[in-house]
Amino acid sequence: MFAFFSRRLRTWLLLTVAVPALAVAARAVAHRIEKRNGPTTVSRALISASNFIGRRSEKSQDLAAGGQAEANRSRFSHRRH
């Protein structure tokens, strides 16, 4: 069924659903590895890949929302906690 979608729709679905799901899965695997063996090179690589994917997906969501999330973040950035 996925093959019957248009190319643009398939690309959008991959970027909005599959890529963030991959980031969540990589983070879950990394935490399982760390729970079993402690921090390893593989677990650190999976976490950094998950962080990278997460930042990219947040940025693309921010661009899709017209940059409103960035405006909200910068509006409250002067507050100290």
Image (spheres, rainbow, N blue to C red):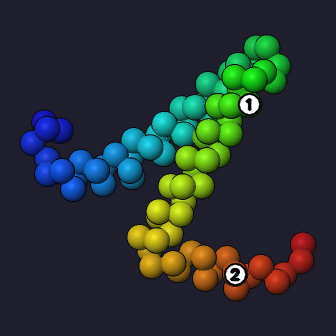
Q: CA distance from mark 1 to mark 2?
A: 30 Å
Label 1 Cα crowd, 10 Å radius (few <14 / some 14-19 / many 20+): some
Horizontally, is 41 left or right of 3 in the view? Answer: right
The three-letter amino acid code for the residue at tag 1 is: Arg
Residue 47 can be seen in this image = yes
Q: Which mark, residue 67?
A: none
Mark 2 crowd level (few <14, some 14–19, many ≥20, 10 Å Cα): few
| Coordinates of residue 63 in the picture (x, y in percent) | 46, 71
Q: Quadrant of the N terminus?
A: top left
Callout 2: SS = helix
Q: Nearer the viewer, residue 64 or 35?
A: 64
> In this orientation, does residue 31 appear?
no
- Residue closest to the far right: 81
The residue beneath circle 1 is: 44
| Residue 48 locus on image (x, y percent) | 68, 39
Vertical position of residue 61 compared to residue 37: above or below: below
Residue of label 2: 74
Q: Nearer the viewer, mark 1 or mark 2?
A: 1
